[in-house]
Amino acid sequence: PRRAGDAPLAPRPAFVLAGLLNGSLGMFVGATGLFVGRLFLRPEWRRETVIGTLALTQSFGHLLRVIAYGAVGYAVFAQMEFLLPLCVAAVAGTAVGRRLNRHVSEKQFRVVFRTLLLVLSLKLAWDGLSGLGVLRWM
């Protein structure tokens, strides 16, 4: 969304871009937060606003994907052995995140947020390339 020293994208273009990325990539890559997360790291927003907005948009995107996949016959609830641990992990992660958030400054949050997005993006790219056989020689 910006280069070092440049002003960030204005809110409206940033949110339009986030919506386009979430909507178009969301059907193929479930981890759209990695693509749109940086667009929500607004200089005028506190960390709670960043977290809440990203969480809401991701929840809405996941809900739409569940509906869309269900409409074409994919039975999400038929795989409870995967769904239940994911739900438990999401609740536990939220609880731990809330506790950690109290001990992190705004500046530290922004560094940690960017670092996590980078690390998770690299992991996603690694997994994708490994699945294609590109990284088999490693």
Image (cartoon, rainbow, N blue to C red):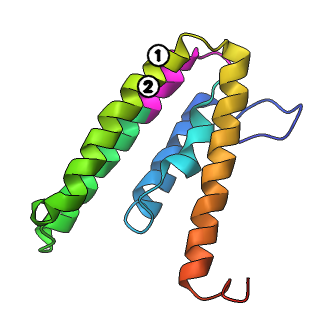
Q: Is residue 81 above or below residue 110?
A: below
Q: Position of residue 92 (x, y in %)?
A: 35, 32
Residue 112 seen in render: yes
Image location of residue 118, percent across then percent down? 68, 48
Mark 2 sits on what residue? Answer: 96
Residue 115: name its quadrant.
top right
Q: Residue at x 79, y 29 (%)?
A: 7
Is the Cβ of the residue at disc 1 closer than 8 Å to that at disc 2?
A: yes
Q: Residue 101 placed where, x, y %? A: 53, 17
In the picture of the structure, the residue carrying the numbered disc 1 is 99
**Disc 2 element:** helix
What is the three-letter code of the residue carrying label 2? Val
Tell me the quarter of the picture where residue 57 sits: top left
**Mark 2 crowdedness (10 Å alpha carbons): few <14, some 14-19, many ≥20:** few
Q: Main secondary structure of the magenta part?
A: helix
Vertical placement of 137 versus 18: above or below? below
Residue at 45% across, 52% down: 22
Rendered image quadrant of residue 70: bottom left
Give the residue at x 11% y 59%.
Answer: 77
- Left or right: 87 as drawn, with respect to 25: left
Magenta residues span 43-54
